[in-house]
Image (cartoon, helix red, strand yellow):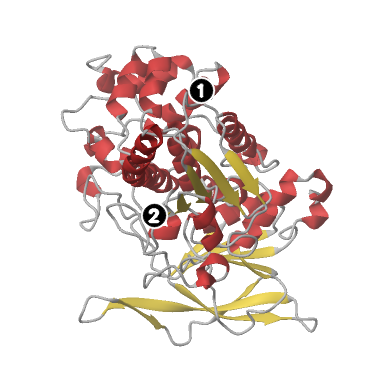
Amino acid sequence: MGEVRGFLSYQRADPEKQPVAQRIGHSREFTSRLSDEKLREQGARCMDCGVPFCSKGCPLGNNIPDWNHLASEKNEQLALEALLATNNFPEFTGRVCPAPCESACVLGINEDPVSIEAIEMSLADKGFELGWIRPQIPRTRSGFRVAIVGSGPAGLAAAQQLNRMGHTVVVFERSERAGGLLTFGIPDFKLDKDKVARRIKLLEQEEIVFRCGVNVGRDISLAELREQFDAVLLACGAEKARDLNIAGRDANGVMLAMQFLADANRRLSSPHTSTTENHPAAGKDVVVIGGGDTGSDCIGTARRQGARNIVQFEIMPQPANLTRFPRRNQRPASTPWPHWPLMLRTSSSHEEGCERVFALESVRFETDADGRLNALVTREVCVSKDELGHTRLEPIAGSEKTWPCQLALIAIGFSGVDSDGMISEGMLRLTERGTVQAAEENFMTNVEGVFAAGDVRRGQSLVVWAIAEGRKAANSIESYLRSKDQLRRPCAESSQADARG
């Protein structure tokens, strides 16, 4: 502990944000990193608990008290090394992770928790700025080749780990650029794409090969990958969006949220298509159906595109409206400390202006004579539990309401992996949730030498979970390859003896 009474001396400080009126005028990041002195003070707030629940709350098991202590002593380079020991990409998680570690912080029992995410982002940014983060090329190669399908956070983490173990890694990405949801799903104002490109370039310098624009299952089959590589890791996400099958769904102006976000990211990366006229939300009444993070990203994106009005609907009732960091005695009984609390969360996009309506069900889309969307009809629902404890949604008679709407974005979750491509080859078993079935202990699928990690295995989840799964899968692949090496080595030794004889 760098400063024994630091948690009593300093209040929590978060990175400064640009004012709303300023930041909605552009699509760049609007949060600044902590100053060097603030970084020291915030690290000093860590109590270096005997049982660090923050590390347990983090899917990566980050050794958070270690790098907080080093940051508090102004030893930022060693702090970064401690951070990188368990987290491949702190520049990503320091921006887009909801920080379950902070919900589990012991200081958060009766005070504001340590600013763990802000410290993480500041250390990562300083590391790139000062050249502390640089390529690590293995001295020797194992002779094994691994194919990774998907270049999102799980695939990138596994690729880096396996490459540093000495294996030759080739990453296949069906989009035109690497990064997966980091590039095409998360808006620029939350994660600048220059930071993603910077990391991809560093991985290429570490001799990882990226083959973009290659759709496994169409351009090359999974069977062919198995023939060409010693192991295959599926890290291609779970992008099959859950749709809303109601009247008028085919109207011009109804879009899936991820299509809207991906199109927006592509538009920003191409200066020839970034005019206001090409922004689908410009001047329109926008309805976002779904109350999660994807819906929130749609709100911020639509606001920057010049939407006239934005409303967000959520079918479930509004959760408890607590303070940003509820104390232990304020938390709902269902999610006590140190669990992630069930509560109403207000994102930076919500701060920028939108109406939020809960316990509301979409009934039908209405169109004009040309088939263009012009309204959405909803009705209120009553939430109850049946005798088995399952949630039931009952519509309330006479509660229908018509909302003006020229753009509707469906953000109600995901239902597994895309059924075309390599899934259609019929080799892989799927779970009831539509994800690829893989063993919990070693991430191997029902197909020998084929592994799965991240959203494709566990379903849509957090970036930090994807990185954690990628790292664990890499360890399992390493064990698998080493076992193959042991099997083939006696044969090689026998052949050498025969040659000498």
- Where residue 260 appears, as percent x and y from the top left, is 65, 60
| Circle 1 Cα neighbour tier, 10 Å, few/some/many (<14 / 14–19 / ≥20) | some
- Where residue 449 appears, as percent x and y from the top left, is 40, 55
Marks 2 and 1, how far apart at CA: 37 Å
Q: Is residue 233 left or right of residue 204?
A: left
Name the image quarter holding residue 482.
Answer: top left
Q: Which residue is mark 2?
A: 344
Q: Quadrant of the N terminus?
A: top left
Q: Is residue 335 left or right of residue 434?
A: left
**Nearest to the observer: residue 256 or residue 353:** 256
Task: State the residue at coordinates (31%, 29%).
Answer: 64
Q: Quadrant of the C terminus?
A: top left
**Nearest to the observer: residue 149 or residue 190:** 149
Badge 2 or badge 1: first in the primary sequence: 1
Q: Which residue is mark 1?
A: 133
**Nearest to the observer: residue 430 or residue 267:** 430
- Where residue 409 appears, as percent x and y from the top left, is 61, 65
